[in-house]
Image (cartoon, grey):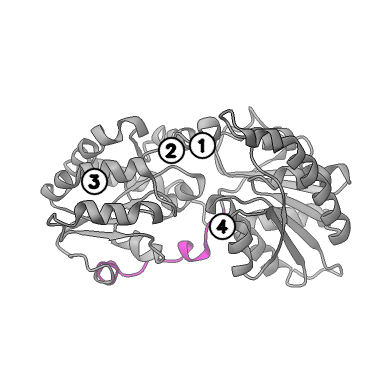
Amino acid sequence: MNTDKAYRFIIAGGGTGGHIFPAIAIADALKLAMPDCEILFVGAKGRMEMEKVPQSGYAIQGLEIVGLQRSLTLKNLLFPYKVIKSLTQAAKIIKEFKPDACIGVGGYASGPVLFVAALSGIKTFIQEQNSYPGITNKILARYAQKIFVAYNNLEQFFRKEKIVFTGNPVRKDICVALPNKKEALSFFHLKEDKKTILIIGGSLGARTINDAVEQNLDVFIQAGYQLLWQTGKIYFEGILERTKDRNLADVSIHQFIKDMNRAYSAADIIISRAGALSISELCIIGKPVVLIPSPNVSEDHQTKNAMALVNKEAAVLVKDAEAKQLLGQAILELSSDREKLQHLGVQIKSLAKTNAAGEISEAIINELTNK
Protein backbone atom coordinates (compact mmCIF):
# COMPACT_ATOMS: atom_id res chain seq x y z
CA MET A 1 0.00 0.00 0.00
CA ASN A 2 1.47 3.33 -1.05
CA THR A 3 0.88 6.38 1.13
CA ASP A 4 2.66 9.70 1.33
CA LYS A 5 3.02 9.36 5.08
CA ALA A 6 5.36 6.98 6.91
CA TYR A 7 3.13 5.75 9.71
CA ARG A 8 4.41 4.91 13.18
CA PHE A 9 2.93 2.16 15.35
CA ILE A 10 3.41 1.07 18.93
CA ILE A 11 2.47 -2.52 19.76
CA ALA A 12 2.13 -3.04 23.50
CA GLY A 13 1.89 -6.19 25.59
CA GLY A 14 3.43 -9.60 26.04
CA GLY A 15 4.21 -11.84 28.96
CA THR A 16 3.54 -15.15 27.20
CA GLY A 17 3.95 -16.57 23.72
CA GLY A 18 0.17 -16.29 23.40
CA HIS A 19 0.54 -12.51 23.39
CA ILE A 20 3.96 -12.15 21.78
CA PHE A 21 3.53 -14.28 18.64
CA PRO A 22 0.27 -12.55 17.60
CA ALA A 23 1.94 -9.18 18.22
CA ILE A 24 4.87 -10.07 15.97
CA ALA A 25 2.47 -11.41 13.31
CA ILE A 26 0.59 -8.09 13.34
CA ALA A 27 3.87 -6.18 13.04
CA ASP A 28 4.93 -8.33 10.08
CA ALA A 29 1.58 -7.71 8.37
CA LEU A 30 1.85 -3.95 8.90
CA LYS A 31 5.37 -3.99 7.46
CA LEU A 32 4.17 -6.01 4.46
CA ALA A 33 1.38 -3.50 3.78
CA MET A 34 3.49 -0.42 4.61
CA PRO A 35 7.21 -1.17 4.18
CA ASP A 36 8.13 2.37 5.26
CA CYS A 37 6.22 2.27 8.55
CA GLU A 38 8.08 2.32 11.87
CA ILE A 39 7.13 -0.08 14.64
CA LEU A 40 8.10 0.03 18.30
CA PHE A 41 7.15 -2.65 20.80
CA VAL A 42 6.56 -1.84 24.45
CA GLY A 43 6.73 -4.69 26.95
CA ALA A 44 7.28 -5.38 30.63
CA LYS A 45 10.85 -5.48 31.90
CA GLY A 46 11.96 -8.98 32.79
CA ARG A 47 9.28 -10.68 30.69
CA MET A 48 9.92 -12.89 27.67
CA GLU A 49 8.96 -10.23 25.10
CA MET A 50 12.17 -8.35 25.95
CA GLU A 51 14.05 -11.29 24.38
CA LYS A 52 11.65 -12.63 21.75
CA VAL A 53 10.78 -9.33 20.05
CA PRO A 54 14.40 -8.29 19.24
CA GLN A 55 14.97 -11.81 17.89
CA SER A 56 12.23 -11.04 15.37
CA GLY A 57 13.96 -7.85 14.27
CA TYR A 58 11.91 -5.23 16.12
CA ALA A 59 12.90 -2.63 18.71
CA ILE A 60 11.34 -2.84 22.16
CA GLN A 61 11.26 -0.70 25.29
CA GLY A 62 10.28 -2.00 28.70
CA LEU A 63 7.99 -0.66 31.41
CA GLU A 64 8.40 -1.42 35.10
CA ILE A 65 4.90 -2.86 35.32
CA VAL A 66 3.92 -6.00 37.21
CA GLY A 67 0.69 -7.89 37.67
CA LEU A 68 -1.44 -7.80 40.79
CA GLN A 69 -0.95 -11.09 42.65
CA ARG A 70 -4.13 -12.98 43.41
CA SER A 71 -2.76 -14.16 46.77
CA LEU A 72 -1.79 -11.85 49.62
CA THR A 73 1.86 -10.95 49.12
CA LEU A 74 4.26 -8.10 49.83
CA LYS A 75 4.65 -7.64 46.08
CA ASN A 76 1.17 -6.17 45.97
CA LEU A 77 2.37 -3.27 48.13
CA LEU A 78 4.57 -2.21 45.21
CA PHE A 79 1.78 -2.51 42.67
CA PRO A 80 0.44 1.10 42.89
CA TYR A 81 3.99 2.46 42.60
CA LYS A 82 4.71 0.24 39.59
CA VAL A 83 1.49 1.37 37.88
CA ILE A 84 2.29 5.06 38.36
CA LYS A 85 5.89 4.52 37.22
CA SER A 86 4.77 2.61 34.13
CA LEU A 87 2.23 5.30 33.20
CA THR A 88 5.02 7.89 33.40
CA GLN A 89 7.31 5.70 31.30
CA ALA A 90 4.55 5.07 28.74
CA ALA A 91 3.89 8.81 28.46
CA LYS A 92 7.58 9.46 27.80
CA ILE A 93 7.78 6.74 25.14
CA ILE A 94 4.67 8.02 23.38
CA LYS A 95 5.85 11.63 23.48
CA GLU A 96 9.21 10.70 21.97
CA PHE A 97 8.06 8.14 19.39
CA LYS A 98 4.90 10.02 18.33
CA PRO A 99 2.86 7.02 17.12
CA ASP A 100 -0.11 7.31 14.81
CA ALA A 101 -1.71 4.31 16.50
CA CYS A 102 -1.17 2.02 19.47
CA ILE A 103 -2.17 -1.64 19.39
CA GLY A 104 -2.65 -3.60 22.61
CA VAL A 105 -2.29 -7.38 22.51
CA GLY A 106 -2.75 -8.12 26.21
CA GLY A 107 -0.21 -8.54 28.97
CA TYR A 108 1.04 -6.14 31.62
CA ALA A 109 2.36 -3.39 29.32
CA SER A 110 -0.78 -3.13 27.22
CA GLY A 111 -2.82 -1.25 29.83
CA PRO A 112 -0.54 1.73 30.60
CA VAL A 113 0.38 2.31 26.95
CA LEU A 114 -3.16 2.22 25.56
CA PHE A 115 -4.50 4.32 28.45
CA VAL A 116 -1.90 7.06 27.93
CA ALA A 117 -2.32 6.91 24.15
CA ALA A 118 -6.10 7.30 24.41
CA LEU A 119 -5.73 10.30 26.75
CA SER A 120 -3.27 11.79 24.25
CA GLY A 121 -5.80 11.55 21.41
CA ILE A 122 -3.95 8.73 19.63
CA LYS A 123 -6.02 6.02 17.99
CA THR A 124 -5.93 2.74 19.87
CA PHE A 125 -6.78 -0.83 18.88
CA ILE A 126 -7.20 -3.99 20.95
CA GLN A 127 -6.48 -7.54 19.89
CA GLU A 128 -8.49 -9.74 22.28
CA GLN A 129 -7.35 -13.34 21.99
CA ASN A 130 -9.72 -15.02 24.44
CA SER A 131 -13.40 -15.84 24.55
CA TYR A 132 -13.65 -14.01 27.88
CA PRO A 133 -11.74 -10.70 28.07
CA GLY A 134 -9.76 -9.65 31.11
CA ILE A 135 -10.56 -6.58 33.15
CA THR A 136 -7.89 -4.41 31.47
CA ASN A 137 -9.33 -4.85 27.99
CA LYS A 138 -12.85 -4.27 29.30
CA ILE A 139 -11.70 -0.90 30.64
CA LEU A 140 -9.62 0.02 27.56
CA ALA A 141 -12.41 -0.97 25.14
CA ARG A 142 -14.26 2.32 25.64
CA TYR A 143 -11.30 4.18 24.11
CA ALA A 144 -10.50 1.80 21.24
CA GLN A 145 -11.38 2.44 17.61
CA LYS A 146 -11.58 -1.29 16.81
CA ILE A 147 -11.44 -4.49 18.86
CA PHE A 148 -10.21 -7.55 16.98
CA VAL A 149 -11.62 -10.78 18.36
CA ALA A 150 -11.29 -14.53 17.78
CA TYR A 151 -14.58 -15.67 19.28
CA ASN A 152 -18.24 -14.88 18.72
CA ASN A 153 -20.63 -13.45 21.32
CA LEU A 154 -18.30 -10.80 22.71
CA GLU A 155 -20.98 -8.12 22.32
CA GLN A 156 -21.73 -8.61 26.01
CA PHE A 157 -18.32 -7.07 26.80
CA PHE A 158 -17.62 -4.71 23.90
CA ARG A 159 -19.72 -2.35 21.77
CA LYS A 160 -20.89 -4.27 18.72
CA GLU A 161 -19.86 -1.59 16.22
CA LYS A 162 -16.24 -1.79 17.41
CA ILE A 163 -15.87 -5.56 17.11
CA VAL A 164 -14.07 -7.06 14.11
CA PHE A 165 -13.99 -10.86 13.94
CA THR A 166 -10.56 -11.77 12.57
CA GLY A 167 -9.41 -14.78 14.55
CA ASN A 168 -6.04 -14.80 16.32
CA PRO A 169 -2.83 -14.11 14.38
CA VAL A 170 -0.56 -17.15 14.34
CA ARG A 171 3.00 -17.82 13.24
CA LYS A 172 3.34 -17.66 9.46
CA ASP A 173 4.72 -21.19 9.14
CA ILE A 174 1.56 -22.64 10.73
CA CYS A 175 -0.54 -21.30 7.86
CA VAL A 176 1.37 -23.18 5.17
CA ALA A 177 0.81 -26.83 4.23
CA LEU A 178 2.09 -29.32 6.80
CA PRO A 179 5.18 -31.32 5.84
CA ASN A 180 4.85 -34.91 4.66
CA LYS A 181 3.68 -37.15 7.53
CA LYS A 182 6.11 -39.96 6.72
CA GLU A 183 9.01 -37.53 6.81
CA ALA A 184 7.71 -35.98 10.05
CA LEU A 185 7.48 -39.38 11.76
CA SER A 186 10.99 -40.22 10.63
CA PHE A 187 12.28 -36.89 11.96
CA PHE A 188 11.07 -37.79 15.46
CA HIS A 189 12.10 -41.47 15.11
CA LEU A 190 8.47 -42.60 15.28
CA LYS A 191 6.88 -45.58 13.51
CA GLU A 192 4.61 -45.35 10.48
CA ASP A 193 2.40 -48.25 11.57
CA LYS A 194 1.34 -46.68 14.88
CA LYS A 195 -1.03 -43.82 15.68
CA THR A 196 0.67 -40.86 17.34
CA ILE A 197 -0.48 -38.74 20.29
CA LEU A 198 1.14 -35.30 20.47
CA ILE A 199 1.27 -33.80 23.98
CA ILE A 200 1.90 -30.05 24.26
CA GLY A 201 1.47 -28.12 27.50
CA GLY A 202 2.83 -24.84 26.20
CA SER A 203 6.48 -23.81 25.88
CA LEU A 204 6.97 -24.00 29.66
CA GLY A 205 5.09 -27.27 30.03
CA ALA A 206 2.09 -28.09 32.22
CA ARG A 207 2.44 -30.09 35.41
CA THR A 208 -1.07 -31.56 35.32
CA ILE A 209 -0.76 -32.74 31.72
CA ASN A 210 2.68 -34.24 32.38
CA ASP A 211 1.46 -36.02 35.51
CA ALA A 212 -1.62 -37.35 33.72
CA VAL A 213 0.40 -38.60 30.75
CA GLU A 214 3.01 -40.22 33.00
CA GLN A 215 0.30 -41.96 34.99
CA ASN A 216 -1.41 -43.23 31.83
CA LEU A 217 1.65 -44.24 29.81
CA ASP A 218 0.80 -47.94 30.01
CA VAL A 219 -2.78 -47.22 28.92
CA PHE A 220 -1.62 -45.37 25.81
CA ILE A 221 1.05 -47.91 24.88
CA GLN A 222 -1.23 -50.93 25.40
CA ALA A 223 -3.81 -49.23 23.19
CA GLY A 224 -1.21 -49.20 20.40
CA TYR A 225 -0.28 -45.51 20.49
CA GLN A 226 3.14 -43.91 20.34
CA LEU A 227 3.73 -40.57 22.05
CA LEU A 228 5.44 -37.35 20.98
CA TRP A 229 5.69 -35.56 24.32
CA GLN A 230 6.80 -31.97 24.94
CA THR A 231 7.33 -31.74 28.70
CA GLY A 232 8.59 -28.19 29.15
CA LYS A 233 11.99 -27.24 30.56
CA ILE A 234 11.31 -27.54 34.28
CA TYR A 235 9.71 -31.00 34.06
CA PHE A 236 11.99 -32.65 31.50
CA GLU A 237 14.79 -34.02 33.70
CA GLY A 238 12.38 -35.32 36.34
CA ILE A 239 10.33 -37.21 33.78
CA LEU A 240 13.44 -38.73 32.20
CA GLU A 241 14.67 -39.85 35.63
CA ARG A 242 11.35 -41.41 36.67
CA THR A 243 10.89 -43.26 33.37
CA LYS A 244 14.48 -44.35 32.67
CA ASP A 245 13.90 -47.95 33.75
CA ARG A 246 10.70 -48.40 31.77
CA ASN A 247 10.45 -49.75 28.25
CA LEU A 248 9.38 -46.60 26.45
CA ALA A 249 10.51 -47.34 22.91
CA ASP A 250 7.28 -45.81 21.62
CA VAL A 251 7.60 -42.58 23.61
CA SER A 252 9.61 -39.66 22.21
CA ILE A 253 10.22 -37.19 25.06
CA HIS A 254 11.32 -33.61 24.37
CA GLN A 255 11.99 -30.60 26.56
CA PHE A 256 10.79 -28.31 23.77
CA ILE A 257 9.72 -29.02 20.20
CA LYS A 258 11.01 -26.29 17.93
CA ASP A 259 9.62 -27.71 14.67
CA MET A 260 5.93 -27.68 15.52
CA ASN A 261 4.85 -28.12 11.90
CA ARG A 262 6.49 -31.54 11.82
CA ALA A 263 4.99 -32.38 15.22
CA TYR A 264 1.50 -31.43 14.04
CA SER A 265 2.00 -33.46 10.87
CA ALA A 266 3.05 -36.55 12.84
CA ALA A 267 0.06 -36.34 15.21
CA ASP A 268 -3.22 -38.25 14.97
CA ILE A 269 -4.58 -36.93 18.28
CA ILE A 270 -3.36 -33.86 20.19
CA ILE A 271 -3.50 -33.22 23.95
CA SER A 272 -3.11 -29.54 24.76
CA ARG A 273 -3.81 -26.66 27.10
CA ALA A 274 -6.47 -24.22 25.89
CA GLY A 275 -4.57 -20.96 25.51
CA ALA A 276 -5.97 -18.71 22.80
CA LEU A 277 -2.95 -18.99 20.47
CA SER A 278 -2.79 -22.77 20.89
CA ILE A 279 -6.45 -23.11 19.98
CA SER A 280 -6.04 -20.87 16.93
CA GLU A 281 -3.17 -23.06 15.70
CA LEU A 282 -5.10 -26.25 16.42
CA CYS A 283 -8.05 -24.99 14.36
CA ILE A 284 -5.73 -24.48 11.40
CA ILE A 285 -4.15 -27.92 11.87
CA GLY A 286 -7.60 -29.57 11.94
CA LYS A 287 -6.88 -32.72 13.97
CA PRO A 288 -8.79 -34.26 16.91
CA VAL A 289 -7.92 -32.47 20.15
CA VAL A 290 -8.31 -33.19 23.86
CA LEU A 291 -8.11 -29.90 25.76
CA ILE A 292 -7.07 -29.68 29.42
CA PRO A 293 -7.57 -26.00 30.34
CA SER A 294 -5.23 -24.46 32.88
CA PRO A 295 -7.05 -23.29 36.01
CA ASN A 296 -4.18 -20.93 36.85
CA VAL A 297 -5.17 -18.06 34.56
CA SER A 298 -7.22 -14.92 35.10
CA GLU A 299 -10.99 -15.16 34.60
CA ASP A 300 -10.59 -18.93 33.97
CA HIS A 301 -10.42 -17.95 30.31
CA GLN A 302 -8.86 -21.23 29.14
CA THR A 303 -11.97 -23.15 30.19
CA LYS A 304 -14.11 -20.61 28.35
CA ASN A 305 -11.86 -20.93 25.27
CA ALA A 306 -12.20 -24.71 25.39
CA MET A 307 -15.97 -24.63 25.85
CA ALA A 308 -16.31 -22.44 22.76
CA LEU A 309 -14.94 -25.43 20.80
CA VAL A 310 -16.68 -28.14 22.78
CA ASN A 311 -20.06 -26.48 22.20
CA LYS A 312 -19.40 -26.75 18.45
CA GLU A 313 -18.34 -30.42 18.75
CA ALA A 314 -14.81 -29.39 17.78
CA ALA A 315 -12.86 -30.68 20.80
CA VAL A 316 -13.03 -32.91 23.87
CA LEU A 317 -12.62 -31.30 27.30
CA VAL A 318 -10.99 -32.95 30.31
CA LYS A 319 -10.92 -30.83 33.46
CA ASP A 320 -7.52 -30.14 34.99
CA ALA A 321 -8.58 -31.59 38.36
CA GLU A 322 -9.75 -34.82 36.67
CA ALA A 323 -6.95 -35.25 34.14
CA LYS A 324 -5.01 -37.97 36.00
CA GLN A 325 -8.15 -40.01 36.41
CA LEU A 326 -9.91 -39.41 33.09
CA LEU A 327 -7.29 -38.66 30.39
CA GLY A 328 -6.55 -42.30 29.61
CA GLN A 329 -10.26 -43.10 29.41
CA ALA A 330 -10.89 -40.13 27.12
CA ILE A 331 -8.17 -41.25 24.70
CA LEU A 332 -9.42 -44.85 24.69
CA GLU A 333 -12.98 -43.73 23.96
CA LEU A 334 -11.77 -41.56 21.09
CA SER A 335 -9.56 -44.27 19.62
CA SER A 336 -12.52 -46.65 19.44
CA ASP A 337 -14.77 -44.15 17.65
CA ARG A 338 -13.40 -43.37 14.19
CA GLU A 339 -16.52 -41.41 13.26
CA LYS A 340 -16.07 -39.07 16.23
CA LEU A 341 -12.37 -38.61 15.47
CA GLN A 342 -13.19 -37.59 11.91
CA HIS A 343 -16.03 -35.33 13.06
CA LEU A 344 -13.78 -33.54 15.57
CA GLY A 345 -11.17 -32.89 12.89
CA VAL A 346 -13.74 -31.51 10.44
CA GLN A 347 -15.42 -29.32 13.05
CA ILE A 348 -12.24 -27.75 14.44
CA LYS A 349 -10.91 -27.14 10.93
CA SER A 350 -14.10 -25.26 10.07
CA LEU A 351 -13.22 -22.67 12.75
CA ALA A 352 -9.79 -21.85 11.29
CA LYS A 353 -8.85 -18.27 10.43
CA THR A 354 -5.59 -18.17 8.46
CA ASN A 355 -5.21 -14.45 7.64
CA ALA A 356 -5.98 -12.78 10.95
CA ALA A 357 -2.84 -10.64 10.99
CA GLY A 358 -3.52 -9.39 7.45
CA GLU A 359 -7.13 -8.54 8.29
CA ILE A 360 -6.07 -6.69 11.44
CA SER A 361 -3.40 -4.75 9.56
CA GLU A 362 -5.87 -3.79 6.83
CA ALA A 363 -8.50 -2.61 9.30
CA ILE A 364 -5.97 -0.48 11.22
CA ILE A 365 -4.63 1.11 8.04
CA ASN A 366 -8.14 1.79 6.75
CA GLU A 367 -9.03 3.48 10.03
CA LEU A 368 -5.94 5.69 9.85
CA THR A 369 -6.41 6.58 6.20
CA ASN A 370 -10.20 7.04 6.54
CA LYS A 371 -11.06 4.37 3.99
Residue 21: which disc?
Answer: 4
Which range of residues does the magenta coloring cover? Answer: 169-185
Residue 259: which disc?
Answer: none
**Rendered image quadrant of residue 81:** top right
Residue 197 visible from this viewpoint:
no
The residue identified by callout 3 is: 214
Q: CA distance from mark 2 to mark 4?
A: 20 Å
Residue 297: which disc?
Answer: 1
Q: CA distance from mark 3 to mark 1?
A: 24 Å
Q: Earlier in the sequence, mark 4 or mark 3?
A: 4
Are the residues tagged 2 and 1 within 8 Å (C-beta)?
yes
Q: Earlier in the sequence, mark 2 or mark 3?
A: 3
Please tell me whether mark 1 or mark 4 is closer to you in this view. 1
Q: Earlier in the sequence, mark 3 or mark 1?
A: 3
Under mark 4, the amino acid is Phe
Are the residues tagged 2 and 4 within 8 Å (C-beta)?
no
Nearer to me, 10 or 164:
10
Q: Examine the rendered structure and indicate whether residue 92 appears above or below residue 82.
A: below
Q: Examine the rendered structure and indicate whether residue 354 appears above or below residue 57.
A: above
Under mark 3, the amino acid is Glu
